[in-house]
């Protein structure tokens, strides 16, 4: 009993210390300097990946221009060391086969320039999401068009090796226009690196895989998936920093579904669902991105149609959401957005109006205030920060 009591006291101290540690980390980040990489669609004026240098303490933004010419780099991820960047090339054809591709780059930290290491087939059409496991040894890709997920090992030089795992999703949904087949839209590992989750818009499921790190193999968990509401279209998800809650964004119903997460079993239990748009809004809307603030107090979601960022406060005991408000993005079709590493700014990419708008985040309420800074770039669709110093 004495040992158990001591453990409880230690855990209690860590919980109490978490806000202080987060505050100190935020203050340290505010004095830093970042690179902001922007992935674009390249059908019109944009030619690939662009970069900016950002100093949050002074709000100074310096454009670095086109840093890599590559087709439709619609989603990006950066390894934890800041050495390599990986991009999906959202294509239906790659070297004559029905597939998109994945590109690996070395990052020049001084100039932001990207040098191509290699480019490989994504093993499926229209890859739309890319992430890395916690070890930095694997790159994970979701192929939207063909509804599959893929794992690539990262070689010593940062390039991508041969596929270590491939899973083809099966099924369809009731929405005849959007759910004729599977459409994997998001893939990512859990904090303990034991499980991989994949949101599939086409079959209304969040699939859960066990992740064997050494060979980079995915195998079905038990249960293998969580069924969402029919025709809900799960698109993206995010985890609470405490690892206890998962938030799933449903594109076709403009809802957020809150789940509790059991890290031992890799299972999800439903807690709440809540709309991303006001009740009085009756026009077409497709939410795109979802993010939990690094301090764990707020959740943000982008609305394409309502053209807003929905802000919610998070109950720290049970993970449920309470609406804070909707903040218009000063542009059309806000697809992706990103919170800078200091946690003080939110950058939102308005795809159709070709602008990136910067907001201050109120650390007490989560409310957003425009800084007046706007970047102009054709078809921005993904934003990723990297700490330089």
Image (tube, rainbow, N blue to C red):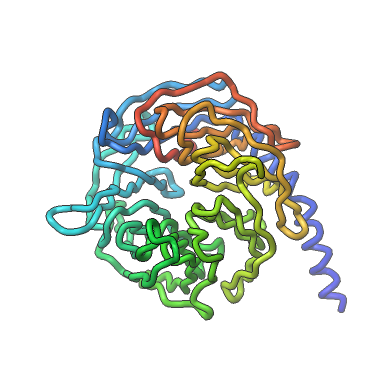
**Circle count:** 0
What percent of the width, then of the height, locates residue 225? 50, 73
Identify whether 360 is placed above or below 76. above
Identify whether 350 is placed above or below 99. above
In the drawing, does residue 44 fall left or right of residue 369?
left
Residue beneath the point at 37% across and 26% down:
377
What percent of the width, then of the height, locates residue 373? 52, 20
Residue beneath the point at 40% across and 72% down:
218
In the drawing, does residue 121 fall left or right of residue 21?
left
What percent of the width, then of the height, locates residue 234? 50, 58
Residue beneath the point at 83% across and 64% down:
9
The one nearer the camera, 365 or 273, is 273
Give the farthest residue toward the left.
Answer: 96
What percent of the width, then of the height, locates residue 260? 66, 65
Whether residue 136 appears in this view of the structure is no
Residue 53 placement: quadrant: top left
Whether residue 352 appears in this view of the structure is yes
Of the 4 image quadrants, the one containing the N terminus is bottom right
Identify whether 274 is placed above or below 270. above
């Amino acid at each position: 009993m004495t040992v158990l009591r001591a453990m409880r006291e230690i855990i209690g101290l860590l919980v109490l210390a978490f806000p202080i540690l987060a505050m100190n980390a935020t203050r340290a980040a505010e004095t830093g300097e970042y690179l902001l990489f922007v992935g674009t669609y390249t059908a019109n004026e944009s030619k690939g990946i662009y970069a900016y240098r950002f100093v949050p303490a002074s709000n100074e933004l310096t454009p670095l221009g086109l840093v890599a010419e590559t087709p439709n780099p619609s989603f990006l991820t950066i390894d934890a060391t800041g050495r390599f960047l990986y991009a999906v090339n959202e294509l239906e054809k790659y070297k004559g086969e029905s597939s998109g591709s994945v590109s690996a780059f070395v990052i020049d930290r001084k100039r932001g320039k990207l040098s191509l290491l290699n480019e490989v087939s994504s093993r499926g059409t229209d890859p739309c999401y890319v992430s890395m496991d916690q070890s930095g040894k694997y790159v994970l890709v979701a192929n939207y068009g063909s509804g599959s997920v893929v794992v690539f090992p990262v070689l010593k030089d940062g390039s991508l090796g041969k596929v270590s795992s491939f899973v083809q999703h099966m099924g369809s949904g009731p929405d005849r226009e959007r759910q004729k087949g599977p459409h994997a839209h998001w893939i990512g590992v859990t904090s303990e690196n034991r499980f991989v989750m994949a949101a599939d818009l086409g079959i209304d499921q969040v699939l859960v895989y066990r992740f064997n790190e050494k060979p980079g193999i995915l195998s079905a968990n038990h249960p293998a998936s969580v069924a969402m509401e029919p025709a809900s279209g799960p698109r993206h998800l995010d985890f609470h920093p405490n690892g206890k809650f998962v938030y799933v964004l449903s594109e076709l119903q403009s809802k957020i579904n809150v789940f509790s997460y059991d890290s031992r079993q890799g299972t999800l239990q439903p807690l709440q669902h809540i709309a991303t748009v006001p009740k009085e809004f009756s026009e077409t809307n497709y939410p795109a991105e979802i993010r939990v603030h690094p301090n764990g107090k707020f959740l943000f979601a982008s609305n394409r149609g309502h053209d807003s960022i929905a802000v919610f406060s998070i109950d720290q005991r049970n993970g449920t959401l309470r609406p804070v408000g909707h903040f218009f993005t000063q542009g059309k079709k806000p697809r992706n957005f990103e919170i800078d590493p200091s946690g003080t700014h939110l950058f939102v990419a308005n795809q159709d109006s070709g602008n990136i708008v910067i907001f201050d985040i109120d650390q007490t309420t989560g409310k957003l205030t425009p800084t007046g800074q706007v970047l102009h770039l054709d078809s921005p669709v993904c934003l990723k920060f990297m700490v330089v110093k």
